[in-house]
């Protein structure tokens, strides 16, 4: 399964030029002379027709490296671990990667799950140990080194490599549209959150899972998505759209193969920790079951509104505050809403006039999970980044969403600083507004994706590709016969002809 992103376009078909095809970019290009002309030297020509080194793909990869280098600089004030005077909040450089090196006992040589419970799925725990324990061993022989800084930099290097690999996968999937990958490479969210946690591990594995599916290798796709799901849960949600689309295309065997191998990979990775260290392995599930409403979620916004509109007596609770006090009910309500959203996506996939693309459905499902979840950490934005790029590569709404994410990032650190110092940085309503704008822009992207599913002629990717470049065995496949029968509405019956008049 090769990536080969440098060619820039497929051998067949013409490449996309955003300054012509994207309304937002076309308008912005007027500042620098207007859209690309008919006789301009294109940067995304096939490699065998272009001797220029700086192809579109290489430019995008270089931009990704630049963004990640700037992210490392932005996190540099926190790398020594000497977080005095709340510098991790005032400089917005906090990272779990460094904090948990100590909190999870890696600095003492503790093996994840065996010696210490870990609050993350197993592959993330293994990853923490694989990079953190060698640093500890090095520190034992070299006590002069700053173990936390070494551990952070080792993780940052690998996570950045996974981010660049994700860009390369996007380029491989969109060889006729190489500039789409610039959305990921230049995303402010990548700059701000790349190494806040280990989410890029799951993002990178899931991206390779998409590539394997696009290359018509469902078994390998399932393994990679299963491994990604063992790092963070969300890649497992992609299996639902794969199965529904395979059902519509009468390629159910490929869909079941992907689901089956994903489950095998998931179980195989979990068993070494779950069997001998059950209590420590179960920490992730325990926390997710008992955790109350977290900052920035739909439920958090509701709690804030409870306090504004509640007219009851002292001690009375609004509905969202009541849910926060009754966590099992909150859990079931969150799961139910997510389940209903998934059911809606499935119906949409089967009823749409043209079979939706995999990335469109995957984005909708993962976005629905975040919208209805009781936890929406700042770095979870990385889950949506590659899915948005593949599902709807248009700059206007994407930039609006990223601006909202920047606002939320700044407001979030204001809340952290206020909590640490017991002196609010700004009124609570400012943070709630930032959270609302973030949620609203994600919901807007969902609406726009649904509109393009219902009106495929508006889909930018379908302007360049005949069907679904991520579809693999589904790409170009006709719908199963039952789909047309199920979607076809019964014709209204003809009114009965009036009887001919009889002679008197």
Image (spheres, rainbow, N blue to C red):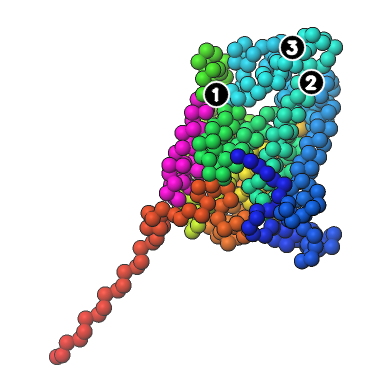
* Residue occupied by mark 3: 137
- State if disc 3 and disc 2 touch (CB < 8 Å): no
Q: Tell me the residue at 54%/13% (across/down).
A: 277
How many angstroms separate mark 1 from mark 3 (CA)? Answer: 25 Å
Give the magenta part as a residue range. Answer: 240-267
Query: Foreground residue, 424 or 287?
Result: 287
SS class, disc 1: helix
SS class, disc 3: helix
Q: Tell me the residue at 59%/32% (across/down).
A: 228
488 falls in the magenta region: no
- Left/right placement of residue 42 relative to residue 459 reads right
How many angstroms separate mark 2 from mark 1 (CA)? Answer: 27 Å
At which x and y percent is residue 503?
15, 90
- The image quadrant of residue 136 is top right
**Residue 308 is at least partly visible in this image:** no
At which x and y percent is residue 192?
76, 36
Specify the label residue 269 is tagged with. Answer: 1
Of the residues under marks 1 and 3, which one precedes in the sequence? 3
Position above or below: 91 against 177: above
């Amino acid at each position: 399964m090769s990536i080969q992103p440098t060619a820039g376009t497929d051998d067949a078909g013409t490449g996309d030029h955003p300054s012509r095809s994207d309304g937002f970019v076309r308008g912005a290009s007027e500042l620098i002379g207007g859209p690309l002309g008919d006789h301009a030297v294109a940067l995304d020509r096939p490699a065998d027709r272009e001797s220029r080194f700086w192809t579109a793909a290489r430019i995008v990869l270089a931009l990704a490296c630049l963004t990640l280098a700037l992210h490392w600089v932005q996190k540099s004030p926190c790398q020594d671990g000497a977080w005095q005077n709340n510098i991790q909040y005032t400089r917005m450089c906090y990272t779990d990667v460094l904090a948990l090196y100590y909190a999870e006992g890696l600095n003492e040589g503790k093996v994840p799950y065996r010696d210490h419970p870990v609050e993350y799925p197993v592959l993330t725990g293994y990853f923490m140990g694989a990079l953190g324990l060698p640093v500890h061993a090095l520190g034992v022989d070299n006590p002069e080194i700053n173990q936390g800084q070494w551990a952070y930099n080792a993780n940052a290097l690998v996570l950045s490599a996974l981010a660049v690999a994700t860009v390369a996968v996007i380029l491989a999937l969109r060889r006729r549209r190489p500039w789409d990958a610039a959305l990921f490479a230049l995303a402010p969210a990548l700059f701000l959150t790349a190494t806040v946690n280990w989410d890029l591990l799951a993002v990178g594995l899931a991206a390779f899972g998409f590539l394997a599916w696009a290359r018509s290798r469902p078994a390998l796709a399932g393994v990679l998505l299963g491994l990604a799901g063992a790092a963070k849960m969300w890649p497992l949600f992609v299996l639902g759209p794969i199965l529904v689309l395979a059902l519509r295309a009468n390629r159910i065997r490929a869909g079941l193969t992907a689901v089956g191998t994903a489950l095998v990979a998931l179980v195989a990775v979990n068993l070494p920790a779950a069997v001998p260290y059950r209590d420590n392995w179960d920490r992730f599930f325990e926390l997710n079951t008992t955790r109350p409403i977290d900052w920035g979620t739909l439920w958090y916004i509701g709690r804030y509104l409870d306090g504004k509109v509640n007219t009851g007596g002292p001690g009375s609770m609004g509905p969202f505050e009541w849910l926060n006090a009754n966590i099992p009910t909150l859990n079931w309500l969150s799961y139910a809403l997510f389940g209903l959203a998934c059911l809606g996506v499935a119906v949409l996939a089967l009823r749409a006039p043209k079979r939706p693309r995999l990335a469109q459905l995957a984005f909708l499902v993962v976005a629905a999970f975040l919208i209805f979840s009781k936890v929406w950490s700042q770095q979870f934005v990385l889950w949506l980044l590659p899915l948005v790029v593949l599902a709807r590569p248009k700059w206007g709404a994407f930039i609006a969403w990223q601006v909202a994410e920047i606002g939320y990032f700044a407001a979030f650190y204001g809340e952290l600083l206020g909590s640490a110092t017991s002196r609010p940085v700004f009124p609570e309503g400012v943070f709630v507004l930032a959270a609302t704008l973030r949620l609203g822009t994600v919901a807007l992207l969902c609406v726009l994706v649904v509109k393009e599913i219902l009106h495929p002629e508006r889909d930018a990717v379908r302007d360049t590709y005949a069907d679904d470049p991520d579809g693999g065995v589904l790409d170009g496949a006709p719908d199963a016969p039952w789909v047309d029968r199920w979607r076809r509405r019964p014709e209204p019956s003809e009114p009965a002809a009036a009887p001919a008049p009889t002679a008197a």
